[in-house]
């Protein structure tokens, strides 16, 4: 286990560098937006990765409510955290793309807006986990995660309709995509997925170690001889 | 009457009776409602031509404030007297407690809305240009959307540090689609510029989804809390 | 285009900061773990 990680880390670094090269140099320049459009190769894969992580959070939370396996709870926590990180990347690269193209930092573009709401929902999930003093925080968090996931289609539909009533500039444009660009996009997505897997794994190991330490500490406190108190 | 609904009715009646006797919450909330309307009128010029465009949003933000204040004390009485523990060991289904609380909150917030609305109409000289009767289902559906989730999250926040801030932190993000719907629907009716139909349907869908979710998960949350 | 480089840089800054926090928490917990293991003996 321990030796695999550095190897995978190096492989991922190579893949990411290759993907960056593809995105910055090899991919064709977009007609209307110019080089700024290359942000697309970071913005979109980060979004897809975040969505995947949130989906993992949902599944882990549902199964946790039935099985109550602490490892599942750790998976839920870690996937939410890493998901929020990737979501933050989407929300930062989005405006950096919008500003030079549209002259405005923010647009109530359906993708950006739904991503913002998603980010808010999962940050609130992380806040509940941090502030809860209940011994059964995992159960409460799982319930919240399910609510968050149920909300996602509603968020999407409401903003979609709102946008068709009040059209806004669309980041990334609609319509079909040049196959060469699609190729570069997929390479970047693969690279970021590998990266996300590594981050997930590291955070998961750290979380499991922390839980073990907490257990050992409470055991120590319980077994402490009364004279010491 | 079935078991669930008779317990729900009994719990709801108890809450109403307790509230009526002390009139604590009602009095403070009445004054709060008036203050909110006045503060908003000072902050957002009511005479301007565009006030009809933003009135929908203003009203719902004001209702949201009122709802959060009401929701925060949902479980306060139960906590003070260890009622929740009694409920956990009783054979009464957890859902009846939830429904009673949610309905009680709904009633409470609805009363507040009924008090604030005439004030808003007067201060903002509001007149609906669209089908005004639709405002009733919009208000009902929107209020229920806030209250059903709010009651649930208030229960989840009971064992958290900074309990009072936790409720809005959890409620607002999840409520965003319903808030968008309430505001757009109300604005549609006030300005008469578009149909509120889609938003009403969205609110119905939202209410169905989350009422079901709350009813399914409340037992778990009550036991876990 | 500076916005392009800013976006790519920002992405990595965010990831590095996060990994930094994970690492620092891990080393702290690791130290506690080793402490506790030592005490057991």
Image: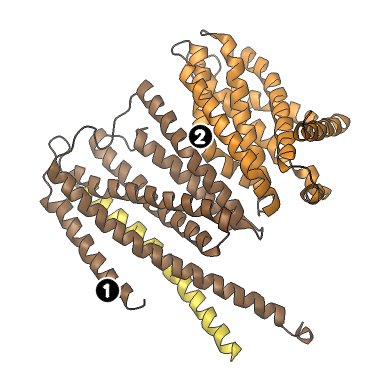
Chain colours: A brown, B orange, C yellow
**Residue B164: percent from left, percent from top:** 67, 45
* Quarter location, residue B168: top right
Residue A110, given in percent of the width and then of the height, sits at 36, 33
Letter of the chain that mark 2 sits on in the rendering: B
> Which callout, 1 or 2, points to the residue nearer the camera?
1
* Residue that numbered label 1 is attached to: A7
Residue at left offset 60%, top offset 88%:
C40
Q: Are marks 1 and 2 on the same chain?
A: no
At horizontal 23% and vertical 60% (from top left) the residue drawn is: A16
Which residue occupies 50% across, 70% down?
A: A208
Name the residue furthest bottom: C41
Q: How many other residues sit within 10 Å of disc 2, few (<14), some (14-19) or many (≥20)?
A: some
**Residue B68 drawn above or below residue B46:** below
Residue at image coords 46%, 54%: A80
Callout 2: helix, strand or loop? helix
- Answer left or right for B210 relative to A57: right
SS of the residue under disc 1: helix
Whether residues under marks 1 and 2 lie with C-beta atoms below 8 angstroms apart, the answer is: no
Q: Report the chain holding disc 1.
A: A
Q: Nearer the viewer, residue B39 or B163?
A: B163
């Amino acid at each position: 286990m321990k030796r695999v990680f550095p190897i995978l880390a190096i492989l991922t670094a190579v893949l990411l560098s290759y993907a960056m090269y593809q995105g910055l140099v090899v991919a064709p320049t977009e007609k209307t937006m110019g080089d700024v459009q290359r942000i697309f190769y970071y913005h979109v894969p980060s979004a897809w990765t975040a969505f995947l992580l949130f989906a993992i959070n949902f599944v882990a939370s549902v199964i946790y409510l039935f099985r109550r396996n602490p490892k599942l709870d750790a998976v839920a926590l870690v996937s939410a955290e890493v998901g929020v990180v990737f979501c933050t990347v989407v929300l930062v690269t989005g405006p950096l793309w919008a500003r030079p193209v549209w002259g405005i930092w923010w647009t109530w573009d359906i993708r950006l807006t739904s991503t913002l709401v998603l980010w808010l929902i999962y940050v609130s999930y992380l806040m509940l986990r941090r502030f809860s003093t209940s011994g059964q925080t995992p159960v409460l968090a799982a319930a919240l995660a399910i609510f968050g996931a149920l909300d996602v289609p509603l968020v999407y539909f409401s903003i979609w309709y709102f946008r068709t009533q009040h059209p806004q500039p669309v980041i990334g444009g609609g319509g079909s995509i040049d196959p060469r660009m699609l190729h570069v996009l997929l390479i970047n997505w693969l690279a970021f997925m590998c990266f996300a897997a590594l981050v997930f794994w590291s955070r998961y190991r750290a979380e499991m170690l922390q839980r073990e330490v907490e257990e050992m500490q409470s055991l120590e406190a319980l077994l402490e001889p009364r004279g010491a108190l | 009457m079935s078991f669930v609904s008779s317990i729900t009715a009994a719990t709801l009646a108890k809450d109403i009776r307790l509230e009526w006797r002390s009139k604590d919450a009602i009095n403070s909330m009445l004054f709060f409602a008036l203050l909110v309307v006045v503060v908003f009128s000072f902050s957002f010029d009511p005479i301007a031509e565009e006030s009809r465009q933003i009135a929908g949003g203003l009203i719902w933000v004001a209702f949201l404030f009122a709802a959060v204040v009401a929701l925060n004390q949902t479980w306060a009485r139960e906590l003070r007297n260890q009622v929740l523990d009694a409920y956990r060991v009783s054979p009464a289904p957890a859902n009846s407690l939830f429904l009673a609380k949610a309905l009680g909150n709904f009633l409470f917030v609805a009363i507040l809305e009924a008090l604030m609305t005439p004030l808003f109409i007067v201060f903002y000289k509001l007149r609906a240009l669209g089908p005004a009767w639709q405002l009733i289902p919009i208000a009902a559906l929107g209020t229920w959307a806030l209250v059903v989730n709010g009651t649930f999250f208030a229960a989840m926040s009971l064992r958290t540090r900074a309990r009072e801030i936790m409720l809005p932190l959890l409620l607002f993000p999840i409520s965003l689609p319903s808030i968008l719907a309430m505001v757009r629907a109300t604005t549609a009716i006030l300005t008469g510029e578009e149909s509120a139909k889609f938003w009403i349907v969205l609110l119905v869908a939202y209410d169905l989804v989350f009422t079901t979710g709350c009813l399914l998960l409340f037992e778990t949350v009550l036991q876990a809390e | 285009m500076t916005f392009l480089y800013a976006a790519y840089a920002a992405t990595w800054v965010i990831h590095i900061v996060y990994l930094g926090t994970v690492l620092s928490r891990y080393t702290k917990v690791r130290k506690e773990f080793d402490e506790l293991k030592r005490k057991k003996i």
